[in-house]
């Protein structure tokens, strides 16, 4: 009887352990889910993805494709094989795309952990699982590759097919997943409805409820819709602070009623890089003037200290404009723009 | 520092200048896109020096230059600091877009007509590429996932035009 109980307990423990192991292996989330749940993780994830693109993926197609051609043609391949293996796995414990990938994967796991999530990069994430599998398959081919010049023509073709499978994992599945993730991180579509929604939420805040405030005066010359390279919550925080500041300054400094706050959206182009920056001119009629230095030095008293920090974190900039027809001034918010285009 | 590598083919009389922060393009193009004579520069200043000394048919230009000393980066660091809020962010910006600063320097030094392949995927930024190519009409781009065949064909097509 006792033995039977012990056996049942052991079995239960075994099943529970197996379930826990299965949950550990297949549980967790992918990068897309992390970005959906925690849009603020976007900039950190984007930084690592860009590094993976540049430091892990960039030369693989050229090398693999070139090697596959050589092997299929039966040309001597030992030297390019050694070159590729060095590029993939490093030499004497230094360098190599695969060790770099593992280091970036650890960074991604840390980013997930900082947001209270467990990333399962090996099993659940389309990008990293493809890359990790691709490098693992390549590693399995090492010995066969190094012996390729002594192999039969049939073995050459089999090896080329195996390399093509690696190529597909890294350069087709990997690249496609990377681009999809970067698109997800990058794009916030800004239109009149979004600007009006943010403004309406601010003007109905309790502290402003008794003031007479006109609807947002959106300049018809605004270049809308446009796209920004930052997550929606960050944009909401920054723009809400600027609207709130403009409304409070108008009340405190006696702007005529009803209080009018305006917005002009202009897309500026860097002449060297052709990178777009979206400039949002948040205009008010408060006669009190700000100084540029107050904006750049995160002048707390003006209520813009926190905003200046948020803007700087997003690679943006605050400036002041006094050439705003119909208004006294504008705080100009410049943020990295992003074109959404598909081939 | 510059590096020269020559290989035999019908295009060996033409010289391609690779401008990159490491050695990957030189190593890979030499092996997998043989034919032209390859020269290498690790930055804009060195590229301009080589262009003065050699008849270059084509420039193969990388975009990011994270691995070169910061003082060798082209571009107005003071202006970039104003635009990006800190000296560190300004350096990062210049390094990440250095290929385009080098491209601008090529134009300023009389090489606007020189064919340039920029190793950068503009497939999601076609309008941006169109704007860049207005300033540099002989600019083309090569995605990261280009095959050896595609790279070789592009290089040959551009240098055969000359």
Image (cartoon, grey):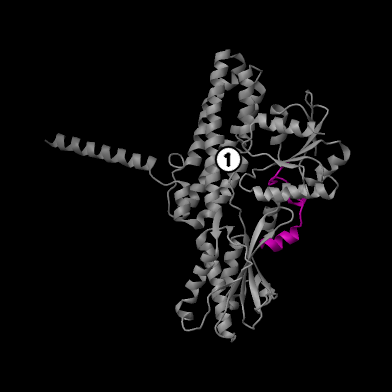
Q: Position of residue B22 (x, y in %)?
A: 71, 39
Chain containing the residue with disc 1:
A
User: What residue lies at 57% left-to-right and 22% top-to-bottom?
Assistant: A160
Please indicate whether residue A208 sits to the left or right of residue B58 in the image. Answer: left
Question: Taking A64 as reference, is A40 above or below it?
Answer: below
In which quarter of the view is residue B6 placed?
Answer: top right
| Quadrant that contains the N terminus of chain A | top left
The part of the chain drawn in magenta is B61-86
Quadrant the C terminus of chain A occupies: top right
Q: Quadrant of residue A161?
A: top right
State the residue in front, A326 or B88: A326
In magenta stretch: residue A50: no
Horizontal side, residue B120 vs residue A217: left or right: right
Query: Under tag 1, what secondary structure?
Result: helix
Find out whether residue B81 is within the magenta segment: yes
The residue to which callout 1 is attached is A100
């Amino acid at each position: 009887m006792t033995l039977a109980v012990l056996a049942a307990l052991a079995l239960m423990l075994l099943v529970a352990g197996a379930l826990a192991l299965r949950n550990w292996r297949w549980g967790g989330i992918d990068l897309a889910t992390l970005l959906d749940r925690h849009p603020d993780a976007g900039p950190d994830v984007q930084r690592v993805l860009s590094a993976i693109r540049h430091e892990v993926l960039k030369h693989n197609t050229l090398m693999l494709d070139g090697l596959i051609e050589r092997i299929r043609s039966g040309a001597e391949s030992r030297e390019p094989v050694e070159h590729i293996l060095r590029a993939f796995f490093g030499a004497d414990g230094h360098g190599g795309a695969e060790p770099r990938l593992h280091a970036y994967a650890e960074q991604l796991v840390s980013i997930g952990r900082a947001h209270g999530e467990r990333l399962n990069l090996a099993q659940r994430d389309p990008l990293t699982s493809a890359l990790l599998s691709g490098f693992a398959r390549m590693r399995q081919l090492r010995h066969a590759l190094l012996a390729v010049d002594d192999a039969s023509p049939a073995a050459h073709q089999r090896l080329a097919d195996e390399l093509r499978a690696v190529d597909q994992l890294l350069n087709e599945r990997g690249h496609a997943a990377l681009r999809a993730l970067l698109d997800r991180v990058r794009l916030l579509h800004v239109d009149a409805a979004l600007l009006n929604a943010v403004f309406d939420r601010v003007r109905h805040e309790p502290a402003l409820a008794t003031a007479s405030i006109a609807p947002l005066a959106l300049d018809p010359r605004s270049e809308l819709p446009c796209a920004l390279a930052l997550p929606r919550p960050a944009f909401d925080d920054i723009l809400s602070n600027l609207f709130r500041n403009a409304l409070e300054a108008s009340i405190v400094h006696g702007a005529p009623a009803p209080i009018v706050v305006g917005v002009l959206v202009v897309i500026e182009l860097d002449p060297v890089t052709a990178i777009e920056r979206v400039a949002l001119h948040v205009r008010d009629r408060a006669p009190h003037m700000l100084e540029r230095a107050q904006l750049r030095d995160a002048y707390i008293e003006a209520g813009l200290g926190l905003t200046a920090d948020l803007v700087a974190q997003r690679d943006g900039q605050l400036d002041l404009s006094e050439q705003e027809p119909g208004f006294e001034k504008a705080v100009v918010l410049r943020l990295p723009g992003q074109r959404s285009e598909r081939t | 520092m510059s590096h020269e590598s020559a290989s035999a083919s019908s295009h060996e009389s033409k010289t391609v200048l690779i401008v990159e922060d490491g050695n990957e393009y030189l190593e890979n193009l030499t092996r997998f896109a043989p034919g032209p004579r390859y020269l290498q520069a690790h930055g804009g200043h060195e590229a301009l020096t080589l262009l003065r000394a050699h008849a270059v048919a084509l420039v193969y230009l990388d975009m990011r230059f994270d691995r070169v000393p910061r003082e060798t980066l082209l571009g107005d660091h003071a202006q970039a600091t104003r635009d990006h809020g800190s000296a560190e962010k300004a350096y990062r910006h210049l390094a990440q877009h250095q290929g385009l600063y080098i491209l601008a320097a090529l134009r300023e030094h009389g090489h606007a007509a020189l064919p340039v392949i920029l190793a950068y995927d503009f497939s999601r930024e076609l309008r941006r590429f169109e704007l860049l190519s207005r300033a540099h009409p002989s600019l083309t781009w090569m995605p990261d996932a280009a095959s050896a065949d595609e790279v070789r064909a592009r290089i040959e097509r551009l240098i055969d035009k000359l």
